[in-house]
Image (cartoon, rainbow, N blue to C red):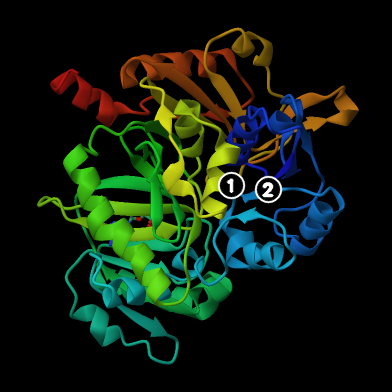
Amino acid sequence: MKVLIVGGGGREHALAWKCAQSSRVDQVFVAPGNAGTALEPKVRNVDIAADDIDALLAFATREDIELSIIGPEGPLVAGIADRFTAAGRACFGPSRAAARLEGSKAFTKDFLERHRIPTASYATFTAKTFDPAYIRTQRLPLVVKADGLAAGKGVLICATHESAIEAAGAMLGGSFGAAGRTVVIEEFLSGEEVSFIVIASDQTVLPLATSQDHKRRDDGDQGPNTGGMGAYSPAPIVTPALHARIMREVIEPTLRGLRADGNPYLGFLYAGLMIAADGTPNVLEFNCRFGDPETQPILMRLQADLVDLCEAALSGALDSVDVRWDPRAALGVVMAAGGYPDSYRKGDPISGFPAAARLPGKVFHAGTRSDARDGGQIVTAGGRVLCAVGLGDSVAAAQAQAYDLVHAIHWNLVQYRRDIGYRAIAYERREPK
Ligand code: AMP
């Protein structure tokens, strides 16, 4: 069979690599893919942008693609799953209506409140209803969020009332385009952040191996927010008791609520949670797709056929699948272009792939392309360029393997964190297995 992966980042490289391992799969297409997907056995890039739904559907029809897996949120929020399904093409990803869980923070806050799922208290404003007096009555710090998709940049934590009023005013004034036409003002929550990712097929859920990511650019979780500078699996903070609580208090009522509202969910569902001191799993956000870079370490541990899993979810048979996970830990370190998450250079030649290929672990590509004018030399082409994933009997061992890969690879102005996994490693030292 033929499979189509939509997207071109590290997540999509990992999805394509995993699908290509299926004995049922003859060919995996990635649209548009990157230099890494182009080199995988059984995988071919297709020059179609991830948000060009018409061209993607025409391609899927022409090639008789039997399964399409959608990586990024943009096409899902725009309704790619509805279009493919209406045309009789199996598409693994939520409908446009269900993807609003990521596409609109105001929608999600109302949804959470209506279904009594724990989350920070909030108020929603448009330019017409904005009331600075409301902000002045709130406890500090305050969180100001643009309603729509803002590539991870639409959340500001404000230490003063004036800065919150200014941030909300700027968003409503157009600093985030249409995404900021509505703003959510939210109570600041403290605690430990956890990502919880499942495959959902209406009310049936397959929780994936636990994971945690590092969103800040610099060591010690300092500096600006990014798309993610590294991730590891499992996340020791998610104990069996916390796991059960998240399922009971967040995942199950969310899927029940979506069904009750007439929008049953299908696909990866990612809950970003803040675990309060009393253990309450408060929802910070939902993503309607697999996380990047969580996908890379999680799929390194998956000992099952991903194509079978997606098809089982599509046919309502997810409860019949048996999934095993590699008991080893996996840890991925993102190698980014200097300057990221602000402006950065593109086109720098990357060296060291042959040395990295001789080492254990796996380097997934994200922002890379191969330069035809330079004999296929692989060059940087995005902010997050590579994700080097190691495996080991502990998070510390996986970290050591991942950094061996990182040290083998180089380009001008490469940047990466040196401490990915430090919380989990401290936990391992305190509570050895
Ligand atoms: P979001 O896109 O809503 O997940 O927000 C991005 C990041 O901002 C989260 O990963 C948190 O680190 C932080 N954040 C968002 N909402 C809150 C909140 N209510 N309290 C504290 N931190 C928050």
Q: Of the residues under marks 1 and 2, which one precedes in the sequence?
A: 2
Helix, strand or loop at mark 1: helix
Image point (59%, 29%), residue name: 364
Please state which amino acid type lies under the numbered disc 1.
Glu
Q: Quadrant of residue 50?
A: bottom right
Quadrant of the image containing the C terminus:
top left
Quadrant of the image containing the N terminus:
top right
Q: Where ligand 1 lies, by quadrant?
A: bottom left
Image point (50%, 38%), residue name: 295
Helix, strand or loop at mark 2: strand
Please state which amino acid type lies under the numbered disc 2.
Leu
| Comparing labels 1 and 2, the label whose residue is closer to the camera | 1
Count up the numbered dots. Answer: 2
Does residue 374 lie above or below 341 as drawn? above
Label 1 belongs to which residue? 311
Image point (41%, 75%), residue name: 107
Please tell me the numbered disc located at residue 407: none
Pointer 1 with pointer 2, Cβ within 8 A = yes
Q: Quadrant of residue 215?
A: top left
- Of the pair 257 and 390, the residue shown nearer to us: 257
Image location (x, y in percent) of residue 193? 28, 47
Label 2 belongs to which residue? 67
